[in-house]
Every structure is written in structure tokens, then in C-alpha cells.
Image (spheres, rainbow, N blue to C red):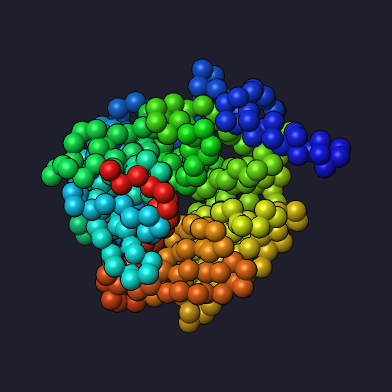
Amino acid sequence: MSQEQWSNLGQQFRKFLLGLVSESNQDVKFSNPSEPTPDTSMQRSTYSGQTSNEAQNSTSGNYGSYGGTSSLEPTIYAEIDDFNPGAILKPGNLLVTFQPRKACYQIDPESGDVEFLFSLRRKQGLFLWRAIADREGNIYCSYSGNIIGQEPYQRAIFGTSGGVVRINYRRTDRVVPLAEDSVNVAVGDNVVDPLGMEFLENNRILVADFNGFGGTGFVYIINRFTGVRERTISSSLFIDPIKAVLDNDGFIWVANADQASQDGDVVCIDPNGKQTIIVQRQGKSVGALVDILQSQNPDELILIRDSLPALETSAILIMNKRNGEFDSIITASRGLPRFYSQGYVDGNYLWVAESYENKILRIDLTTRSITQEIDATRIRGGIRGFRSSYDVIESISVIPKDVKQK
């Protein structure tokens, strides 16, 4: 097949993913909303918040682990908790989520000034994963998980329920948030643990849902205004899909973590639907992938990896899409522990937070060097280190330079 034919096929596949044509493949399943949803053993029962395998869904950390169902609350979706009515989204500011407070902030990249925007809550608890802003002044947040018990004996559980909530930050004339300021655009039995998000054209969002950890995750495309799911992509290779990106040639690249082994790989789904592991597993405890990002170089992708519990092999990597080989931009080492957030590529720069040293980093992708450091102690406090991976800056993105403010 010629390069031109291959490119045309890729464009056709990309259009299919955006709902313009239809296709199917036996290796990778693409389902419409009217078709059966991916068969997983860990999806929750409606309203009960229970799963058929709670113990396998549990996780550990600050919140310990949990293997029962008796204390789970009925599903309630996220709503605004605290809200700063005086804040206006500033073009080019950094948008940061801080996990312990379930809160979102904006940071001026020039001055380092930090401004609180809002925090989220729900009765059964939640984890705030990622926040991205559109040009209309809306902030989209992915969340999931339950938190049960009282401090210091809290427990966390995943594989129950989650969602994507849209926060309207355009209006500046309200004192308290109105109902329409917070809309759960993607919820339901098949929205379980959405984490990574990427805007697509035609008002779509590409979402990676790890669905309780352990081999039941999937990827889907939703309409960012209606929340309607337009495509679901499941794969036998998926373990804990954390983030997916769709490139201009119609290839889907998935950061496929394995949290249990602290390992993972990168899965590529080509325009024919063929699935290939491009980056092989690196070995137990080397680190789980937490993000995959498109680079300014169309032949490369950015990978972010965190290793728990020692944090000695965390790294930011540049991957060659053709052969899966990668080079390190920054790596941790023994005595130099690091824990990186989900990142964001803005032109020639990568923004990422590093929570052990309380810094936000701007990395030049051409020179592969750190060109700016912002003090993050005004969000996290001044002490180095953290208690667990829940005690960190979770994600960072950039507010569009043409965002509508009111």
C-alpha cells in the first residue's frame, strides 16, 4: 500500500471514530450506543454501587484497601462544593487539579500566582482526575471512586461509578454556583472510572476509562455538550487504559497501565483496527504509565511514568511511533525520587507537575531541557515528599489563549 493510500485510509478511520462513517473489526470492538456495551465483570449494578468483584477492584494508599460492599452509598454524581465567584479564566494560565482537596486552581505561568477556582464533592466521595478547558469557558473534569469510613481509617474503592462533569466558568455575575454551572455530561452504568481526556474535533472528547483496574478498561468518545457516547473501543490487550490520543493519521495510541504490577505498555490501534503493542512492558515495579501525549513532532509521542512505592524509576519519555523506541527527558533515581502528574503539550513545551519536590516544570521538547520551574508549595505546602499517590497534584493543562471570559 502506498503512503498516500495509507494516509487516506487513516483519514477515513479518523472520520469513522468521529461518527461520520461506520466500521468494525474482530480484534478491536467499536460499538455504537445501540449495541451491547463491552462485557466486563466489574461494572456496577445500577444504584447499588456494587460490583461482582469488589476485592479485585480495591486499591491502597492513604485510604487503604477495601473488599466489601455493605457500606457503599447509592450512586450520586459530582457537584460543586466550594466555588470562587470572583475568578475569571485567564488565557494561557495553567489549570491544575489537586487530589487531596478535590480542587481545581489556575496558575499564572509568568508570576506563579495561584488562584482557587472550585472543588467537587459527592456523598460517596470521589477522586478528581483531570481538568481541561474549552474555548467556551467550560472546564471538563473526570472523576470516579468511592471513599468510605472516617479519617484516619478511610478506604478507597474503584470500579463502581464515575463521570465527566462540565463546570461553566464563563459567567461572572453569580455569587453562588447555579445548577446549570455544574452538569454531569457523561454518567451511567458504563461510565465507571474515566480518567484521561482529550478534545477531538466536532465537539467530541476521547476518554480512557480504567474500569476498576485489572483488564476490564475501555476507551470511548462522547459528545462534550450532550454526553452521548458515540463510540466505544474495547481491546483484549487493555489492562488499565489511563489515557488515549488520536493522531492525524487515524491511529489511536493508548497508555495501558498495569497498576498491580507497576508496569504497562503502549497499545496502537491502526486504521484497519489491528492492535499492536508498540512499547513492551518494562518489568515489574519499573512504573505504571500515567499519561500519553501528542508531541509537536508527528513522529513522536510523550510518555509519563510513575513508579510506586520507591519513586526511583519515574520518568518522562519521548517515544518513536514507528518502532516504539524511547529516550528519557527526565528520570528519577535512587536518592532522587520523583512523581509526575498528567501533563499537557502547549506548542513546543510540555507542562508537568512534580509533587515530590513541589514544582511545576516547563520542558522544551526540542532541547529536551527544563526551561522554567514554578513553586507549587502554595498548593501542596512546603514539605518535600507525600504520603501516597493520592496526596499530589494530579493533572495540569493550559487554558486556551482564545477562551471566552464572559
Percent x, y of residue 369: 56, 74
- Residue depicted at 51% across the width and 58% down the height: 346
Percent x, y of residue 206: 51, 39
- Left or right: 288, with 283 as reference point: left
- Residue depicted at 57% across the width and 45% down the height: 245
Front position in the image: 100 or 65? 100
- The outermost residue toward the top is 34
Quadrant, the N terminus = top right
Front position in the image: 167 or 192? 167
> In this rendering, does residue 16 appear at all?
yes
Percent x, y of residue 357: 39, 75
Front position in the image: 307 or 78? 78
Percent x, y of residue 34: 51, 17
- Residue depicted at 70% across the width and 28% down the height: 26
Q: Is residue 302 above or below residue 138?
A: below
- The outermost residue toward the left is 175
Front position in the image: 406 or 141? 406
Quadrant, the C terminus = top left
Q: Is residue 169 above or below residue 377?
A: above
> In this rendering, does residue 214 appear at all?
no
Q: Is residue 242 above or below residue 310?
A: above
